[in-house]
Amino acid sequence: MKNILFFICLFPLISTILLAIFRYMSRILVIIIGVGSILLSTLFTMLITINYYLIPNPFVEHIYNWISIYDLKINFNFYIDGLTIIMICIVNGVGLLIHLFATWYMYEELKYNKDYLISRFFMYMNLFMFNMLILVLGDNLILLLLGWEGVGLCSYLLISYYYRINYNVFAGFKAFITTKIGDLFFALGIFLIWDKFHTLDIQFFLNKASILNNNYYLINEFIAFLLMLGAISKSAQIPLHTWLIDAMVGPTPASALIHAATMITSGVYIIARTHILFEIAPITIKTIGIIGTITLLLASISALTQNDIKRILACSTLSQVGYMFLAIGFKAWNAAIFHVMIHAFFKALLFILAGSLIITCGHEQNIFKIRSIFLSLTNNIRKKYYFCFIIGSSALSALPFISAGFYSKEKIIWLSYISGHIRFWILSLFGAFITSIYTFRTIFIIFNKNINKFIIYLNIQKKLRYNLSHNLPLLILLILSTYLGSLIKIPMQNELQIYKIFNSNIEMIFNIISSIIVIFGIILAAKNFLFSNIYNIDIIEFSLGKLVRNIIYKIGGFDWLYAKLLIKPYLYLVRKNKFDCINLIFNNFIKFILFTNTIIIKIHNGKLSLYLTIFISGVIFMITTFLMSNIL
């Protein structure tokens, strides 16, 4: 089994190269290469996973010697342990379902639009998968950094896929530049690790860091803080979260891949992979928990003001990743990774449903307009969408007992309490309450039959064909988003030890409290958006005013803050330096040298009369100066 590990990355890479070279191949051939390669990669992933569950022994597979410069020796090696297993299963398993759905979605999306190549889309998607697999499998920090930068590049390419629209390109730039800010600190952290520990091998470095903890306490804290900054940029946590909402301009399958299977949880993976370092950096790990808590609350409240279905899902991603960071804040590593897996299931389901609904409703994304169009569809189609959205939204809201999200999110909430972080527990409960409101607000607005005004009748459903590539991913993700998905056991050993001390009856009581809060949120959403005709009143604006509503809508107004503090001052300096003052100084200095050189050349022209004139003038000047000095 050790000799087949590199095939997991090889197939997405080969398909990327083929799609890049043969860009104008037929759609069927693009699908065979694009989806087939991910299928093959997933099959090899299943073999590795089954083998690891039978024989849970971590191992390293050496591919080739990569870099050798004096003491710096970096091999292209892949490392397998329980964390790697669960991550490659998420990336390849959920990624395959998204690829399969993308064949249906992109066909309907580009059916009447020939400006964009479907081969380019799958090339970017497969390159994304390749880089994420490199990130997850790499056994050293340089290989990890290679995949880390690769997913950043691919996110830009996918977000700005519809490049003929300027705003889409700007959104891609924003994602790329914002994540690069975190990448800079991440790279600095890697340089410090090499400088202090003289190794870039992840496992060797972690062992060395734990042994030399007392000697390098401050440097451990600083390195962990730098890695944290890189993690929050990729995982879009405050204050480097502003790119994620604008990233919704990309194709919906790309959004599903970014949010569910790849980039958005890579920050959580990095911290979990280097968890030994963070365990000996208490200030940084507490900061991670605080950042996660603030993000989950602010994003959840912001979702109440959003009307674009994809932006609502983007806010939900921010809040759910916030729960993962909150879990990291009190060292519940496996609870965070378990929620990564469950979140991948229901978030992929919700994005696929949103993409299908957008196509069905004529590329409309506003939930109020979708409702108007949706009521004109056949009753059978409406029932199917309603059922699927209920399952996905139940998992997102952590509806008790029947949804997978309940078992992953409630574990984080429960562990926050028993670990002594009462404030985290209270705020996480409040976040769950808001989540249930905005999630079912979306459903009740779209499926509210009580509102019959402004119905737009479109006979769209006759033109669409919901084939296997559309239905199979939905069916599998529906199953995984229910209680059955929570039965999957992640092969990780590092559990919060205090969890074993408490009686399960106490846990059940606290879960009941959480369940009541979630159900109360759903009831409140139903009262305001299902059994009421006042569906278009913005609760936040009505309660707190327009200014506060706009700040919340922008998730804290960080875009405005960055524009005032960074972008506008920078543009002001650029305008002041329009003619490049520094360059002007150097150019004038050069002109002075050239002028002096010209004068000297004209003086040294070989004419004796000129030399005598200069000599006599010099003598007269010196005598005059001498006499004047004596007189004075």
Image: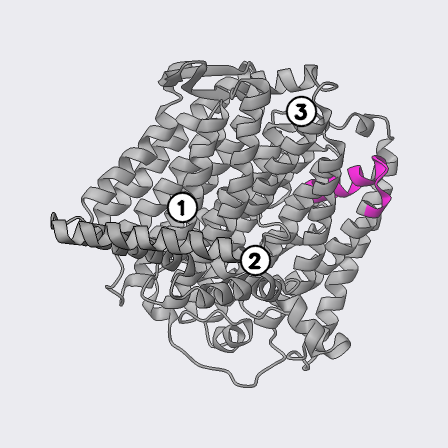
Is any part of residue 35 visible from this angle?
yes
Dot 2 corresponds to which residue?
242
Residue 391 shows in the view: no
Q: Mark 1 highlights which residue? A: 153
Q: CA distance from mark 1 to mark 2?
A: 17 Å
How crowded pointer 3 is (Cα within 10 Å; few <14, some 14-19, many 20+) is rated as some
Q: Position of residue 535 (x, y in %)?
A: 65, 78
- Magenta residue check for 626: no
Is the residue marked by circle 1 packed among few (<14), some (14-19), or many (20+) residues within 10 Å? Answer: many
Q: Secondary structure at mark 3?
A: helix
Q: Amino acid at mark 2?
A: Thr
For the residues labelled 3 and 2, the Cα–Cα distance comes to 30 Å
- Between 608 and 182, the one nearer to me in the picture: 608
Instruction: Please provide percent x and percent y for residue 630.
Output: 50, 53
Q: Which badge, 1 or 2, is on the more N-terminal residue? A: 1
Q: Is residue 475 left or right of residue 62?
A: right
> In this picture, is 27 found above or below 529?
above
The amino acid on which the numbered mark 1 sits, given as a three-letter code, is Leu
Q: Which residues are magenta?
A: 407-423
Residue 427: numbered disc: none
Q: Which residue is mark 3?
A: 276
Lower sequence index among marks 3 and 1: 1
* CB-based contact (under 8 Å), mark 3 and mark 2: no
**Residue at x-position 54% and y-position 37%:** 186
Q: Residue at x 83, y 50 (%)?
A: 426
Asked whether the residues under the numbered discs 3 and 1 touch, taking CB atoms below 8 Å apart as contact, a structural biologist would say no
- Please state the horizontal and vertical placement of residue 194, each as a whole percent of the image: 54, 23
